Amino acid sequence: MLARSIGVAWARLNERLSLWAGIGPDEARGRAFGSFGAGSYIMWPPTTIFNERYIHIGEHTLIGQHAALSAGMVPGQECVTDRVVVIGDRCLIGRGSGIVGHFSIEIGDDVWTGHHVYITDQNHGYGDISLPISRQTQPERAISIGDGSWIGHGSVILPGARIGVHVVIGANSVVTSEIPDFSVAVGAPARVIRRHDPERGWIDVD
């Protein structure tokens, strides 16, 4: 009984601390961002946040605990574009997720993700077998996620992915290409299994 009471008290304290110690638009840390909309919040503790001036967050967006949010490879890096990572209004980024931008990641309004989702617009080259992969080129391709979409727990969104509006990405999927509007995609690589037809409604895709 005592252990349960201590557990409940600790959970409540942790929740209050997460809200009190997080990052909002009016704090010094929040003002370092390229833009940080009213009512938005990054919960404490984050894992990694750097080069905030290249990151733009809309209004009433919540980023969960232990999230990584960065632009470029290292703190202080000069990025090629001013808006490397853009997260829209009313988004929810799940706990333990990572958004690592180098060129362009655009997340629309009302996009929600499950926990532990990873989104990056840069990959590793491995074509030259005489060099370690860490020393090879790291190609970048823009990513976009359309309004009102849902990205399931544990999914990975890789360079060049273009996810349409009102799309569901199933848990643990890996998205590497284009997923059209109003569809459901699952798997690695993700493929469309359902789509919405204006006349017939939701249709299973073989």
Image: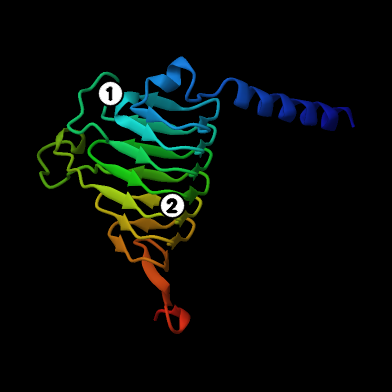
Q: Does residue 4 sit above or below 119 in this rendering?
A: above
At mark 1, the secondary structure is: loop
Under mark 1, the amino acid is: Val
> Where is residue 77, by image quadrant?
top left
Q: Position of residue 5 (x, y in %)?
A: 84, 29
Camera-nearest residue between 190 and 16 = 16
Other-residue count near label 2 (Cα within 10 Å), few / some / many at <14 / 14–19 / ≥20: many
Residue hosting label 2: 155
Q: Does residue 81 sit above or below 26 in this rendering?
A: below
Figure colour scheme: rainbow
Residue hosting label 1: 74
The residue under the point 41% across, 68% down is 182
Q: Does residue 11 sit above or below 88 in this rendering?
A: above
> Where is residue 205, by image quadrant?
bottom left
Q: Position of residue 181 (x, y in %)?
A: 36, 65
Compared across the picture, whether 86 is left or right of 137 comes to right
Q: Position of residue 44 (x, y in %)?
A: 55, 25
At mark 2, the secondary structure is: loop
The residue under the point 49% across, 49% down is 112
Compared across the picture, whether 63 is left or right of 100 comes to right
